[in-house]
Amino acid sequence: MKWRPRLPVQALALSLALAGCSVLPGADDASPPEGQAVEAAVSPLDRYAQRQRALAEQAQARGRWADAARAWEVLILLQPGDAQARARLHELRQHIEQLRARHRDAALKAQQQGQLDSAQQSWLQVLALDPRDGEAAQALREIERERSRRAQLGRFSRTAAPAAEPAPRGSASVKPISR
């Protein structure tokens, strides 16, 4: 499944950009300290874009791939001509797809071997990379159904287990009653 920006992400980015452009009353009254005179020349939109770039880089450094992709998407919405951000997002999407395929293969293998815990962890990794992955969501539902089935079978086998078998007639342990 390809990673595509959704309209809500674009709307969120626009609203965050507009919020970053707003200025609180009285904020312009004080003159900036001498060392910050250059920062005052940077527009609020540019500062917000810088924060988005920093968030994207931090998320990538921490292995939070989906968060990093969203931050790069927001940055591209704010600065459509930023070729570096577009390149970083493209590389990140390729990396996410490779990771998703690796976790998917591991999940399928574990599920076929009956290792439900391992399969569940791998499918959850797939969903962390792409929350809209329908195959992973369906596989997790199947794992829960299988766990439930196993629990039911286990419960019935414990309650329906036959009692100790009676000794066969004529065995040495049973003596006939004589009168």
Image (spheres, rainbow, N blue to C red):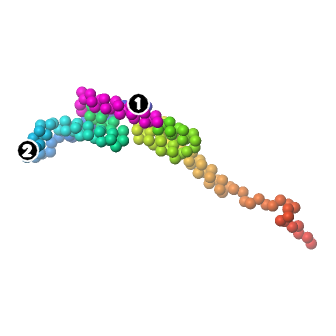
Question: Which amino acid type is shown beneath numbered disc 1?
Answer: Lys
- Name the spot of residue 7 as percent of width and height, x first: 33, 33
The answer to whether residue 138 of the structure is visible from this angle is no
Judged left or right of residue 48, residue 153 is right
- What's the residue at 34%, 30% (across, down)? 90
Q: What is the spatial separation of the Cα atoms under label 1 and label 2, in whole angstroms?
A: 48 Å
* The disc label shown at residue 34, or none: 2
The nearer-to-camera label among 1 and 2 is 2
Residue 129: within the magenta? no
Judged left or right of residue 144, residue 131 is left
Q: What element carries label 2?
A: helix
Q: Residues within 10 Å of mark 2 (few under 14, many from 20)?
A: few
- What's the residue at 40%, 38% (across, down)? 129
Magenta residue span: 78-102
Question: Which amino acid type is shown beneath numbered disc 2?
Answer: Glu
- Name the spot of residue 164 as percent of width and height, x first: 74, 60
Q: Quadrant of the N terminus?
A: top left
Which residue bears the numbered disc 1? 2
